[in-house]
Image (cartoon, rainbow, N blue to C red):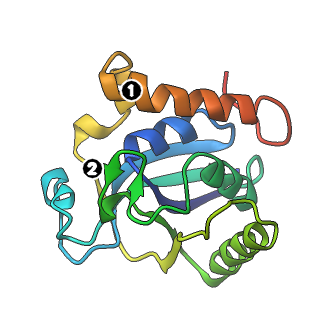
């Protein structure tokens, strides 16, 4: 197993966590905060939109099963990278589209992938996804971990996360990227 890591923000971390937990090759998904200027932020701090952090997920994946391009394919299919500081009704810089790379090879691959999306006019509007060097990850509070799995009947889970998961299931039901059973 060749485990690699990437930190992604694409709206609410509950959504991103639930999406990546169902993808084969993903070893672990952890919600948290990154990209801000405030040490050890809590959820309330990040929601104030004053810390500079984004809600993110730290993904560890087996590169021999799912490579970085596969991670990026799922990422760009599971959120709208063209809306600045929002995903649907979730509004604020903590919900921005952002990728934190760990080394230059990862940075180059991410920039190349985004370039291909732009050249292919994959999205009607311009991609606003930030690509930044990873510095520090702060794990979210325990109640955020496995949020969808632990709360499938809550309103946000039913109205926002479930339809997103169904969209991802449909898109990746066949092909190189496979879903966990």
Classed neighbour count for the residue bearing mark 2: other residues with Cα under 10 Å, few (<14), some (14–19), many (≥20): many
Q: Name the disc covering residue 157, or none.
A: 1
Residue 152, compared with residue 174, is above or below; it is above
Q: Name the disc covering residue 140, or none.
A: 2
Tell whether 114 sits left or right of 142.
right
Q: Nearer the viewer, mark 1 or mark 2?
A: 1
Q: For this rendering, which residue is in front, 4 or 20?
A: 20
**Dot 2: element:** loop
- Would residue 50 be seen by someone viewing this image from the given angle? yes
- How many numbered marks have been drawn onto this rendered protein structure? 2
Residue 177: where, in percent of width, then height?
77, 41
Q: Name the disc covering residue 179, or none.
A: none
Residue 10, compared with residue 137, is above or below; it is above
- Would residue 2 be seen by someone viewing this image from the given angle? no
Residue 37, compared with residue 19, is above or below; it is below
Classed neighbour count for the residue bearing mark 1: other residues with Cα under 10 Å, few (<14), some (14–19), many (≥20): many
């Amino acid at each position: 197993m060749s485990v690699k890591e990437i930190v992604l923000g694409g709206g609410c971390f509950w959504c991103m966590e639930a999406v990546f937990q169902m993808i084969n090759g993903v070893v672990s998904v952890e919600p948290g905060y990154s990209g801000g200027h405030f040490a050890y932020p809590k959820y309330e701090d990040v929601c104030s939109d004053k810390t500079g952090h984004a809600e993110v997920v730290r993904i560890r994946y087996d590169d021999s099963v799912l490579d970085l391009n596969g991670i990026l394919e799922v990422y760009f299919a599971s959120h709208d990278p063209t809306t600045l500081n929002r995903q649907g009704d979730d509004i604020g810089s903590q919900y921005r589209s952002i990728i934190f790379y760990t080394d230059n090879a990862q940075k180059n691959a991410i920039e190349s992938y985004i370039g291909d999306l732009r050249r292919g006019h994959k999205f009607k509007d311009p991609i606003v996804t930030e690509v930044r060097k990873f510095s520090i990850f702060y794990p979210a509070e325990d109640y955020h971990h496995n949020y969808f799995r632990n709360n499938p009947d809550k309103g946000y889970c039913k109205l926002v996360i479930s339809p997103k998961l169904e969209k991802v299931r449909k898109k990746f039901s066949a092909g190189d990227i496979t879903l966990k059973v």
